[in-house]
Image (tube, grey):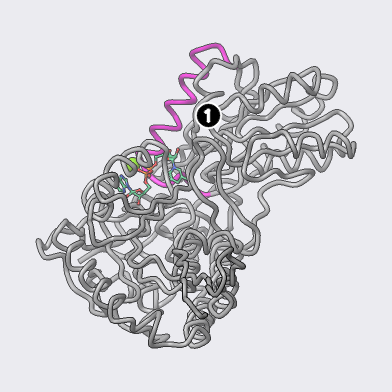
């Protein structure tokens, strides 16, 4: 039995959440809840308190085999993409969105407990954006069209149809557990695919709860399957399996390279949404008040645990001190605390002991190599000592070749760097293997357009940061990924185009 007493400063844990946590957590395969064949389990814990939350089935290769068989069978039977009309599929996806919305308090608590993020943020951001995502793609289900092509042959009709790819293995990270799953599941479903979801081992709970909502909505069995487990076992087996047509992955570039290697034998489709070292550029002519707030949340939002986090901050020299002072003041006001605390904080802990170690490693290295800490730089103690809390940290006096400037930290750490002119900062901004996001703050129209055109990134924000929308495509240039999620572009990742020729004359 797991002891479900939590720190006394926690908000009340909902009875549904308590009941859910107390249950045995099995795999969801072919519409049934089954334990891992080997009986293996792993533990997931609360990063705010370090306390054990649940033991979850740890899928191994044989469980992946069972899930692929179930998903394949459903796909090959056409139960989802052929026997239901597109609008029937859309209606089920919409129903799922309604269920997500009606269980928002439960899902928010599960993600807050598992990931550490403030429950208020999970409730206001992660869960509603997930529901919205399903709604957006519910609308696409009956709008995925082909074309009639005027080919150069007399008496020949040529047209295209867009078909689902088949069985999709969706491997997602822990930073927005429900939302990252929704980004992939929703377009895959709308296009008629069957899905095997592999949530991150740090945050498996909301994915399991989501499977219940699929059941409740009445999806045909086998359309949606969940395998909780580790990347090196469950993830790797999914990637290698010849019965899986496509892998959709969000996570580290290192694992993405492994996935590309391991998918080579089956030549399956792979789309990748990876990290970044996103440049955020403040020009002297910007609305500096706006820019200070924007740059502070560009890095510290979700504790820097976002793929688009604005971790390289370039500030025009004439306003460098002013902006930095403003940011240090704004940062000092950030409240860091337990994700489930009654006094809701702005930021919770980082997700795990490993991330704590990685991020603190970067901070120590930065300090050791001569960078100066303007604010932050330490692990937090006191009543937060059992969790993985790090002070929001701003570095200055950094050199471009330092690891803290070049590598993704994925934590609340920003490097502020002064620049003199536009060409210099443009070169520096693009001097990275990544290309997920970039931003600038200026009142000058020409600068805004010039930089929007020349920054090598899948998203450019001007006088704003972090906006995403189900309708707007999102993804990376260079080593930040392959393919675009969201918008109508995501449908390309989950469809094959078939060209059909018919002699009519
Ligand atoms: P990761 O890339 O190892 O994990 C992401 C997902 O991939 C998880 O579901 C994991 O189980 C799975 N996975 C791991 N190894 C696999 C394999 N060999 N085959 C198939 N699937 C596999 O990320 P991790 O270790 O949690 O974090 C390490 C770093 O990755 C972070 O510090 C951050 O820099 C980056 N990261 C980036 C994210 C993003 O949104 N771009 C999200 C999470 C991590
Ligand atoms: Mg890993």
Which quadrant of the view contains residue 220?
Answer: bottom left
Residue 122 percent across, percent down from the top left: 54, 62
Identify which residue, 257 or 277, lies in the foreground.
257
Q: Main secondary structure of the magenta part?
A: helix
Residue at x 67% of width, y 38% of height? 438
Identify which residue, 244 or 336, lies in the foreground.
244
Which quadrant of the view contains residue 229?
Answer: bottom left
- Which corner quadrant of the figure contains ligand 2? top left
Residue 74 percent across, percent down from the top left: 28, 78
Q: Residues within 10 Å of mark 1 (few under 14, many from 20)?
A: some
Left or right relative to 214: residue 497:
right
Residue 498 percent across, percent down from the top left: 45, 67
Left or right relative to 403: residue 151:
right
Which quadrant of the view contains residue 217?
Answer: bottom left
Residue at x 51% of width, y 73% of height? 105
Identify which residue, 343 or 304, lies in the foreground.
304
Residue 367 among those drawn in magenta: yes
The quarter of the image holding the N terminus is bottom left
Q: Is mark 1 within 8 Å of ligand 1?
A: no
Residue 380 percent across, percent down from the top left: 48, 37
Which residue reaches farthest top?
370
Which type of secondary structure does the marked residue at label 1 adopt? loop
Residue at x 77% of width, y 38% of height? 292
Residue at x 75% of width, y 42% of height? 293
Q: Which residues are magenta?
A: 348-371
- The residue pinned by badge 1 equals 433
């Amino acid at each position: 039995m797991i002891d479900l007493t939590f720190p006394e400063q926690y908000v009340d844990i909902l009875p549904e959440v308590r009941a859910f946590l107390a249950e045995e957590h099995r795999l969801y395969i072919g519409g049934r809840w089954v334990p891992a064949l080997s009986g293996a389990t792993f533990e997931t814990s609360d990063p705010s308190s370090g306390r054990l939350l649940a033991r979850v089935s740890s899928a191994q290769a044989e469980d992946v085999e069972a899930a692929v068989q179930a998903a394949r069978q459903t796909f090959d039977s056409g139960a989802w993409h052929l026997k239901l009309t597109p609008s029937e599929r859309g209606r089920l996806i919409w129903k799922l969105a309604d269920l997500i919305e009606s269980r928002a308090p439960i899902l928010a608590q599960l993600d807050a407990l598992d990931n550490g993020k403030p429950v208020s943020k999970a409730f206001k951001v992660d869960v509603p954006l997930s529901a919205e995502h399903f709604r957006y793609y519910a609308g696409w289900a009956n709008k995925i069209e082909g074309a009639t092509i005027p080919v150069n042959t007399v008496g020949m009709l040529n047209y295209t149809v867009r078909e689902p790819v088949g069985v999709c293995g969706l491997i997602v990270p822990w930073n927005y557990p429900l939302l990252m799953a929704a980004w992939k599941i929703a377009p895959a479903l709308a296009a008629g695919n069957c899905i095997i979801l592999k949530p991150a081992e740090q945050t498996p709970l909301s994915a399991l709860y989501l499977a219940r909502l699929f059941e409740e909505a009445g999806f045909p069995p086998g359309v949606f399957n969940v395998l909780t487990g580790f990347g090196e076992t469950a993830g790797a087996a999914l990637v290698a399996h010849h019965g899986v047509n496509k892998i959709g992955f969000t996570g580290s570039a290192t694992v993405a390279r492994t996935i590309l290697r391991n998918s080579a034998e089956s030549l399956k489709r792979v789309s990748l949404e990876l990290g970044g070292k996103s440049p955020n550029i403040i020009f002297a002519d910007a609305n500096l008040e706006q820019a200070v707030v924007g740059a502070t949340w560009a890095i510290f939002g979700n504790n820097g645990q976002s793929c688009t986090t604005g971790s390289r901050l370039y500030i025009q020299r004439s306003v460098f001190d002013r902006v930095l002072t403003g940011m240090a003041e704004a940062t000092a006001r950030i409240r860091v605390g337990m994700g489930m605390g009654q006094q809701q904080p702005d930021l919770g802990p980082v997700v795990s002991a490993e991330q704590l170690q990685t991020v603190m490693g970067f901070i120590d290295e930065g300090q050791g190599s001569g960078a100066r800490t303007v604010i932050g730089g330490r692990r937090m103690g006191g009543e937060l000592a059992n969790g993985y809390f790090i002070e929001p940290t701003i570095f200055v006096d950094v050199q471009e070749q330092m690891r803290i400037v070049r590598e993704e930290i994925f934590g609340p750490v920003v490097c502020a760097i002064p620049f003199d002119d536009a060409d210099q900062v443009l070169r520096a901004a693009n001097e990275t293997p990544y290309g997920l996001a970039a931003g600038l703050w200026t009142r000058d129209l020409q600068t805004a357009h010039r930089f929007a055109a020349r920054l090598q990134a899948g998203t450019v924000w001007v006088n704003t940061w972090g906006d995403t929308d189900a309708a707007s495509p999102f993804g990376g240039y260079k080593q930040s990924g392959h393919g675009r999620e969201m918008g109508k572009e995501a449908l390309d990742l989950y469809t094959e185009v078939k060209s059909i020729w018919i002699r009519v004359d």
